[in-house]
Amino acid sequence: MNKQELIAKVNAVLAEEFEVDEAIITPEANIKQTLELDSLSLVDMVALIDNEFAVKIPTTELSKLQTFEALYNYLEEKTNA
Amino acid sequence: MLEQQPDIFALIPQRPPIMMIDTVIDASDNHIVTQLTIQEDNIFVENNIFHEAGIIEHIAQSAAAFAGWQTYNSGQPPRIGYIGEIKNCHIHALPKQSHQLQTHLQLMAQAGDVSLVQTQTTANGHIIADCQMKISLKAQ
């Protein structure tokens, strides 16, 4: 999967799971605000990423992933490792 | 299996007659196995049947025990875990008095102080319930 395919898949699965319009997911957008995640629903995103991309995001890394761009880069690095 | 069973009173805040776990028989950073033998005087037993509320309470206390274990195992005082959400909970059968319940809880994901766990409960070896829960650890 190249980066464009990865971005498309990330956006599609997140938009479907959290019931938002895919168009509002942009690289610079804040993940929590865009997906309207609170402390309870944030764990759903971690579980979804694990299920879809086989990448476990540790809590220590999660706080660094503020934007979708950061998430794309993190997943690209982990899935190519 | 744990070589030494932890003191269940140190893992969960509940006390008799509402305690719905007798022992923790296995545990790690990402799972726990709890056990309860249903006694005649259990408050959730009626007409020899252990009712749904008792099963849910047993599962919830297993989740609390897992939260307690995570800090107890690292030598820190146990933190109290609250149930943040219960979903996809299915009860397939009601156990009877004297049956032995075992709940296997598996950590699915973690984000900060919130854990997503999947549980499966058996009674005398037969699956009677499965459930998904979110546990939130109380701030220290």
Image (cartoon, coloured by chain):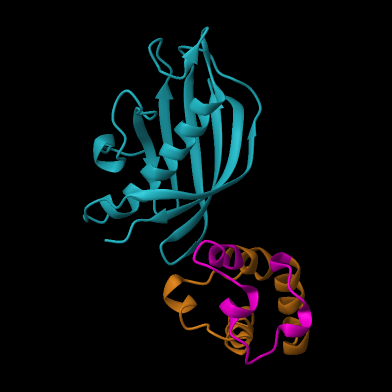
Describe residue A56's horizontal placement relative to residue A1 as left or right. Answer: left
Describe residue A5's horizontal placement relative to residue A32 as left or right. Answer: right
Q: Which chain is orange?
A: A
A69 and B41: which one is in front? B41
Is A35 magenta? The answer is yes
Q: Quadrant of the C terminus of chain B?
A: bottom left
Give, as a single range, the part of the protein colored magenta: A17-46
- Check the image and report above or below for A19 versus B94: below
B20 and A56: which one is in front? B20
Q: Does residue B5 appear in the picture of this structure?
A: no
Q: Position of residue B66 (x, y in %)?
A: 39, 46
Q: Position of residue A4 (x, y in %)?
A: 76, 88
Q: Quadrant of the N terminus of chain B?
A: top left
Instruction: Determine the image quadrant of residue A26.
Output: bottom right
Which residue lies at the image location 47% right of the left edge and 71% below the top edge? A58
Describe residue A70's horizontal placement relative to residue B57 as left or right. Answer: right
Q: Position of residue A56 (x, y in %)?
A: 54, 69
- Chain B colour in the picture: cyan
